Image (cartoon, rainbow, N blue to C red):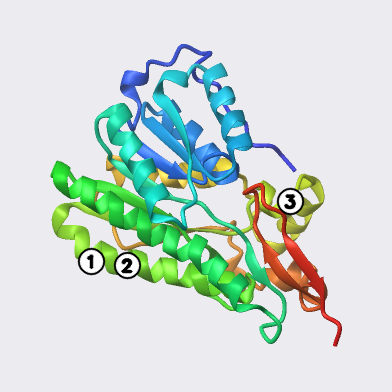
Amino acid sequence: MTPLRVVDRASQGKDYMDGRLTGKVAVVTGGANGIGRATVRRFLEEGARVVAADLNPETGKETVDMMTGAGFGANLRFIRADVAKEEDVAAALRLATEAFGRLDCVFNNAGVAGAFGPISHQTVEDWDYTFAVLVRGVFLGIKHATRIMRAQRQGGSIINTASIAGLSGGDGPQAYSAAKAAVINLSRACAVELAADKIRVNAICPGGILTPLLHRGNPEPVAEVLQKLQPWPEAGLPEHIAAVALFLASDDARFVTGAHLVADGGLTAQGGNAIRGLAQGEGFMSTVGVDRGTTGAMPEIRLIDE
């Protein structure tokens, strides 16, 4: 796998007054790892001030330390937030206005893999947990961003992380796929409602991306599988999705709303079905449980005994 080169622009003396997000303030949920962390860094590099919200305080501290070491400490705040709780989402967005004076972009990115296993064996609790994080969290981010952006009367950009799993039946577990499909349609519906306020609402549909949520600390074999699954000869990296988020957050996308941008190395173009391609199909149907991702909470995995 050829790694994506990440340029430390702070060490090169970049003038941040010419960044694509100069003067803008953004909130990134799930901002302490994977796609969220890469987006926090890219937004900071492009001149934004950023609030990173995440449930995991340990990775939150890591992110703050990394960004401070790169020269971005003054423009970053971290807040621990459970996106399934309205008060936490509201507090994260309020911190942006309190610390930086305004809010221009909200990236509703926090996510978990959620419930998995045969549909006949999944619990209501695991299903509801999945939807609480993946759909309620997006709804709450849109709701509270809308209130602030409408009051500012200067428009804004709301970006939601969906997935190619929301476009088909073979690229993710059932609850995850259904939740991501809901995110895509919620983005469309809100784009129509908020267009008059010049608030843009878009979704990003990543394919297989080498984040800790997918590779669990062992990226090389997963990268090899992804490169075989998709036409594009490179595995997807968090920085690839951060670049898409940058476009949607910037004024370059001022005529883009209600869209779902697919960034998957051509996987869906050739038919997807990533669950089978990742050789998880058999194991996927022999266990049941819930995967809480990088939140710091342990997964629950149970063997099916019938």
Q: Which residue is nearer to you in this view: 199 or 140?
A: 140
Q: Residue furthest front?
A: 87
Q: Say if 38 sits above or below 202 in the image.
A: above
The answer to whether marks 1 and 2 mark residues whose Cβ atoms lie closer than 8 Å is yes
- Give the labeled residue for mark 3: 215
Image x and y of residue 99, in percent: 32, 28
* Secondary element at image label 2: helix
- In the rendered image, which quarter is residue 259 located in? bottom left
* Residue at horizontal 62 percent and vertical 36 percent from the top: 59
Image x and y of residue 296, in percent: 66, 47
- Crowding near pointer 3: few (<14 within 10 Å), some, many (20+)? some
Amino acid carrying mark 1 in the image: Val
- Horizontal relation, residue 289 to residue 238: left or right: right
Quadrant placement of the C terminus: bottom right
The answer to whether marks 1 and 3 mark residues whose Cβ atoms lie closer than 8 Å is no
First in sequence: mark 2 vs mark 3: 2
Amino acid carrying mark 3 in the image: His
Marks 1 and 3, how far apart at CA: 36 Å
The answer to whether marks 2 and 3 mark residues whose Cβ atoms lie closer than 8 Å is no
Q: Which mark is residue 188?
A: 2
- In the rendered image, which quarter is residue 292 located in? bottom right
- Horizontal relation, residue 284 to residue 239: left or right: right
Image x and y of residue 204, in percent: 45, 57
- Horizontal relation, residue 47 to residue 135: left or right: left
Amino acid carrying mark 2 in the image: Arg
User: Is residue 114 visible to us here?
Assistant: yes
